[in-house]
Image (spheres, grey):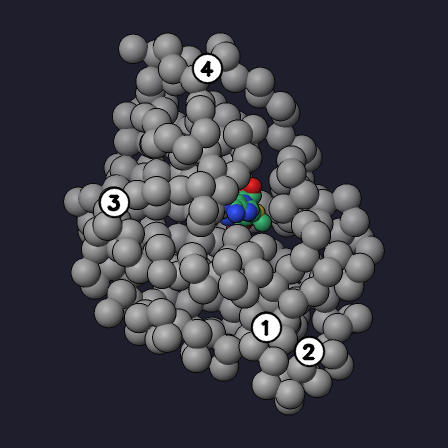
Amino acid sequence: MQNRRLVPRKLIKASSLDLTKFLLKSKPKQIRDEIPTLNRFGYMKSEHEYFGNKFIELAKITKKQVLEIGPAYGWLTHKVLEIGAAIVALDISKEHLEILVKEAPKKYLENLYVYHGEFPDEVKFKDNSFDAIMASRILHFLDGVTLERSLDKLHNWLSPSGKLVATNCSIYHSSVKGKMSKTFQERIANNERWAGMTTNNDFDRIHDDHSAYFLNCFYKEQLEELLPRHRFKIEQINYFDYPKDPWPDEGKGHIGFVATKI
Ligand SMILES: C[S@@+](CC[C@H](N)C(=O)[O-])C[C@H]1O[C@@H](n2cnc3c(N)ncnc32)[C@H](O)[C@@H]1O
């Protein structure tokens, strides 16, 4: 029955939603290689890169649903649906989720679930719910304390040997490196745990219309210390630039990882 509304903090099957009740804000036009979000949480990419492809591969082999946190308009969620896998799309923005549902391939709508809520504190799933979780360019919107709490929740939600895949802005990203490079290096030298923390005053002004209040940028050694402390074994971790990025950061603008629950 297609008579349900998208309500907060509930897992909802997309095919049960009444699309005529959607506000359906229109999706902004693409800028460079990305589409701005409607809530100043940066942009959505729509291009294949290693970590997104890895998540698609994991979705292909699991019999369970997978989870994408912060999908925005759902480019990657739609790719997962297109291979016949089932997925939960979880986002803080109701408008993003409405567009994601509206634009989802109709043939696969039965496999799509949505969850409107703020990760981690407004979100509940049973332990061992997922074999794979993707957090693409969303963990950097969490302060350090919240991130540590999030990693423990993600650990609980993953099944034994389940995998967490994530991509994040690094301290070498063009939006912050201009103003913050020296500060980052000083903080790292002083062993500050969240050395990549910035406020929007520190960003390149070109992002003024679309940027969040802060960005917690990461670097490799920091994640190599953090993830095992939260019972994740790192399978792969590396810096990268998105293939169509018009301002590549010498291959270091983002940092991605695949980590297995231990
Ligand atoms: C930068 S976009 C990333 C979009 C896409 N995953 C990508 O990699 O291009 C961040 C997305 O995360 C969502 N988001 C930000 N903070 C969130 C939170 N605490 N809980 C759930 N979603 C969040 C935003 O609404 C937005 O859709």
Q: CA distance from mark 3 to mark 1?
A: 30 Å
Residue 192: percent from left, percent from top: 61, 80
**Mark identifier at residue 126:** 3
Within 8 Å of ligand 1, the CB of disc 2? no
Residue behind mark 4: 19
Residue located at (52% from left, 72% from top): 239
Q: Is residue 250 left or right of residue 176?
A: left
Residue 68: percent from left, percent from top: 40, 46
Q: CA distance from mark 2 to mark 1?
A: 9 Å
Residue 123: percent from left, percent from top: 40, 42
Q: CA distance from mark 4 to mark 1?
A: 42 Å
Residue located at (35% from left, 12% from top): 2
Label 3's element? loop
Q: Looking at the picture, does residue 8 appear above or below residue 32?
A: above
Question: Between tags 2 and 4, which lies in front?
Answer: 2
Along the viewing direction, whichever of 144 and 132 lies nearer the viewer: 144
Residue behind mark 2: 184
Of callouts 4 and 1, the N-terminal one: 4
Question: Between tags 2 and 1, which lies in front?
Answer: 1
Q: Looking at the picture, does residue 217 appear above or below residue 4?
A: below
**Mark identifier at residue 194:** 1
Label 2's element? helix
State which quarter of the image contains the N terminus.
Answer: top left
Of callouts 2 and 4, the N-terminal one: 4
Q: Looking at the picture, does residue 23 appear above or below residue 249?
A: above
